[in-house]
Image (cartoon, coloured by chain):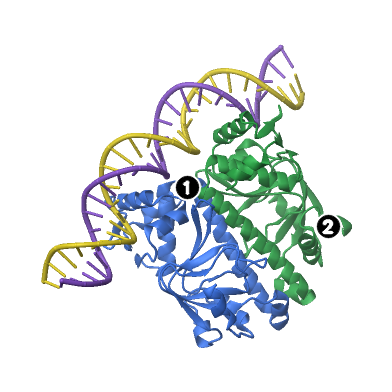
Chain colours: A blue, B green, C purple, D yellow
Amino acid sequence: MQAYTAANSLRLPTAAAIVMKGATAIPRQSNAVAARPVGVARTLGKGEELFAEGDAADFFYKVVSGTVRTYRLLNDGRRQIDEFQLAGDIFGLEAGAKHRFSADAVDVATVVAFRRRRFETLAHDDPALVDQVMSSMMRSLERAHDHMMLLGRKTAQEKVATFLLDMARRVSNEDRFELPMQRTDIADHLGLTIETVSRTLTQFAREGIIKLAAASRSVVLCDRVALQRLNA
Amino acid sequence: MQAYTAANSLRLPTAAAIVMKGATAIPRQSNAVAARPVGVARTLGKGEELFAEGDAADFFYKVVSGTVRTYRLLNDGRRQIDEFQLAGDIFGLEAGAKHRFSADAVDVATVVAFRRRRFETLAHDDPALVDQVMSSMMRSLERAHDHMMLLGRKTAQEKVATFLLDMARRVSNEDRFELPMQRTDIADHLGLTIETVSRTLTQFAREGIIKLAAASRSVVLCDRVALQRLNA
DNA sequence: CGCAGAGTTGATTATACTCAAATCCAGTGG
DNA sequence: CCACTGGATTTGAGTATAATCAACTCTGCG
């Protein structure tokens, strides 16, 4: 709802077009948004909600910095985190009028809101762009399919291995990186409990596959081959 | 590959536009395809493959009759069925040049193949249509998110209950219906084993929540409230 | 009738969960 | 600088859910 008022103050004539172009041509670390200040950036505090399931979906978002989690809840509080949205990622586009999931900040994060427009209009303004929007959509679908495979058929070890490789690729593409989220979030993303995530990580560390720093948020991948093998 | 040669013989100038319109306006049981014979219908035998992961994605498909399963495999054979495609469902649209999953017929099924076109062209021909394509895409994404919740956080009972309600709605919207697929398929869709699926169904039957016919493929939902409660 | 594939049922086990406690760490304030 | 606090994480012990292994039954069909 705060998200809402903030978003309502935006005026963005071709915002969607710009963000989409940036997103498709240069998937991450795109500076299209920074180069053309088309929307008001909003900074979220740790855990602050951007929108909730059921809110009107008049806006969609692009992460500028930090990490946002998109998730669903069951009525008894069980949570499934669909995706972690990192810098450059676009999320919150909906088929209907309402958001189908909630979104909040894993830690301090900055996002830009874009007014949702009819794609019809978009298509008229820039037909080539529509291809890009579709591609973005379909990549998201692909990731969803990957994740269904993980959730439905992989073991705890395989889930964690896949997760580590994926995060390494997304946050830095190096062997050493910082996990932006805590164990609870990882657990709710992988369909595990926090204890199982912790145990699996410690086990990997004992086996020399990874190194965990004292703070436990920084990870070094020592044996990508072993992880890849578990990645199945 | 057989799918491939068959598909190559098609000539469909505005096929995509037509199927898409039908799909969005009348999601299922649409007769848009029947009304305008734009593509060659292909009938698949039980278990026959339409395309496999990695095949060129020059075509996408719409189910005319029967059921098609779309799935992925891990290298050791574990399978995750993403979706069961029923009459009227569209599947096989990809972001890239290749199919990201395999598709084969659960039982005898008929599909129509449509040549993939650049959405740019589509947008030029019929801008309003683009909205519909996007909507179709996003609904698919929504279902994927629902299913991630199911796979990651629901118990076996909840999974089966959700599945039964969903299938009832999709195949007939009545309390009595036939499951088009066998236990193995249900298991691979819900992230369970065949034994657990069987046991859960028997348990529901013992509790009077459902009735199973001798053939075990026909189901009667006796207590939707109980199922809905498990649906969480 | 016999066969094969599908489905069910039973016994046992393993993986991951639950409950519980200990430890670690960052931040705070004396 | 150091003790204290609360949240996050790890570790441990025991358990439960669903998996595994195996046998048996049912159904449809030649």
Circle 2: residue type: Val
Badges 2 and 1, same chain: no
The front one of B181 and A50 is A50
Q: In the image, B56: left or right of B38?
A: left
User: Crowding at label 1, few (<14), some or many (≥20) Cα neighbours within 10 Å?
Assistant: many
The dot on residue B33 is 2
User: Crowding at label 2, few (<14), some or many (≥20) Cα neighbours within 10 Å?
Assistant: many
Residue B62 pos. (x, y %)? 75, 55
The dot on residue B185 is none
Report which quarter residue C9 is drawn in: top right
In the structure shown, which secondary structural element does the residue marked by tag 1 occupy? loop
Residue at horizontal 28%, vertical 63%?
A: A215
Q: Which quarter of the image is occupied by the N terminus of chain A?
A: bottom right
Protein chain holding label 1: A
The front one of B51 and A57 is A57
Report which quarter residue B161 is drawn in: top right
Q: Does residue A117 lie above or below A78 as drawn?
A: below
Circle 1: residue type: Lys
Q: In the image, A2: left or right of B71?
A: left
In the rendered image, the residue lying farthest to the bottom is: A36
Q: Does residue A169 lie above or below B212 as drawn?
A: below
The front one of A49 and B11 is A49
Q: Does residue A31 lie above or below A140 as drawn?
A: below
